Amino acid sequence: MEVIDILTRTAHVLAVLAAILLLAWAGRAAARLLRQPEVIGEITTGLLAGPAALYLMGPASFDAVLPVPVLDTLRLISKAALALFLVGLAHKLQTGPGKQPRRTTAWVAAGSLVPPLVSGLLLAALIVVTDDAAARGDAPFAAFVLMIAVSMSITAVPVMARILTDRGMSESSAGRVALGAAITVDAVGWLLCMLAISLGEGSLAGFLRSTLALAVGAACALAIRFALRTPLARRAYGRTPRTVAVVLAVATLAVAIAMEKMGMTAIVGAALVGFAIPRDEHAPWAPAVDGIARSGRLLVPAFFVVTGITVLNGSFSQASWLLIAATFLLACAGKGVGGYLGARLGGRPPADARRVAVLMNTRGLTELIVLQAGFSAGILTGPMVLALVVMALATTALTGPLLGLLDHRERRVPGPAVQAGSAEPELALAMEGSTR
């Protein structure tokens, strides 16, 4: 390729990226006006941008504006951005927020994981019974069922954290319990996602190859963890923190690319590195990880646009309304009922349990990452991804209004057992801590 061609393609990619970032800004602004988390507007506008542009411009004009080489470059950028962002998310998943009651958190995590997994099994059974070939695809049945179950169980930790902050619930007992449980659920969900991708190979050779990829990725992640725990790494970080952060980012991308070359999605490689980075007072890597995650988060809107173009184009006409409605209803029932029962079994009062149930139904960006992994592995089809995307956006958008309704209801029915902000949740928290 000549220099002029490289410069032309680079300028084209930068122009498209600028348009994507502008679109993301508009989506965030619209979400703020609607009193929704900004990520909802960012995801929605990004996913719909490609299909809308294709419909309005036609295939010929669309291919001229976004030719295949430029789209391939955007796909690489979106994968790199997602990997870097996921490092920060996985790093945070190692431990939950402090001071949450462990017993309650465990019950809420169980309630928010097991019933949604069951609702995923019911959704898979519905797809099989109705013979929905567009949603079923041709992936191995075990991998298909497990991936759908995992997709129904995910709770978006970043979006929940933002909602808690915006509503001043970060230090409330319900907020701490919900966030701690969400971290636990997502950590288990990623392990199940890896298992589903391994099963998706459909043969012993494929399973062994996936197992080998996981082993190599885990070994690389452990090597990074060992290196970061050495005095030499800590001294280097103290002198040149930005340089060390860049080296860590490059190492993350190397592990992600290596795992993808071996047949495992790059997302899993990035998650393994994020889990492996030390998180304790003797190895303060959090600022470096946060910087890496912010760099990736800046370009994550490209991931939404590429996903909309590659996954959702053509899926709108193939996904049935029955599939979309069943996905949404089963997702709400699994998380809502499971989260409420878990909180009640964990000793929370009804008011807290209702808030926890609503919060655990938050999905968003984390759900899209899991869906992309399932789609890239050939386990989920475009129509199935569309139904799950609609479910993720709808359940996340409902979180704020439902919390507002609960606040309004409890203001109308004051009392020590239900009044919002009453002392009962804190008393229960103190009593639970004294019984550990």
Image (spheres, rainbow, N blue to C red):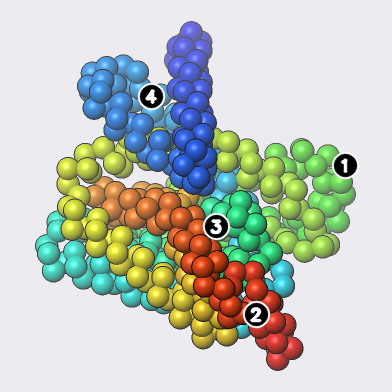
| Residue, disc 3 | 160
Q: Does residue 114 appear left or right of residue 356 in this picture?
A: left
Does residue 392 sit above or below 99 in this rendering? Answer: above
Q: CA distance from mark 2 to mark 3?
A: 23 Å
- Badge 3 amino acid: Met
Quote the CA–CA distance across marks 4 and 2. 60 Å
Residue at horizontal 35%, vertical 50%? 389
Q: Which residue is mark 1?
A: 239
Nearer-the-camera pick, 398 or 201: 398
The residue that appears at 40% across and 30% down in the rendered structure is 72
Q: Can the viewer see residue 211?
A: no
C-alpha gap between disc 4 and disc 1: 41 Å
Q: In terms of image quadrants, where is residue 227?
A: bottom right
The vertical placement of 265 against 44, above or below, is below
Neighbour class for label 3 at 10 Å: few (<14), some, many (≥20)? Answer: many
Identify the residue under disc 2.
Answer: 424
Question: Disc 3 and disc 1: Cα gap in Å?
Answer: 35 Å
Q: Amino acid at mark 2?
A: Glu
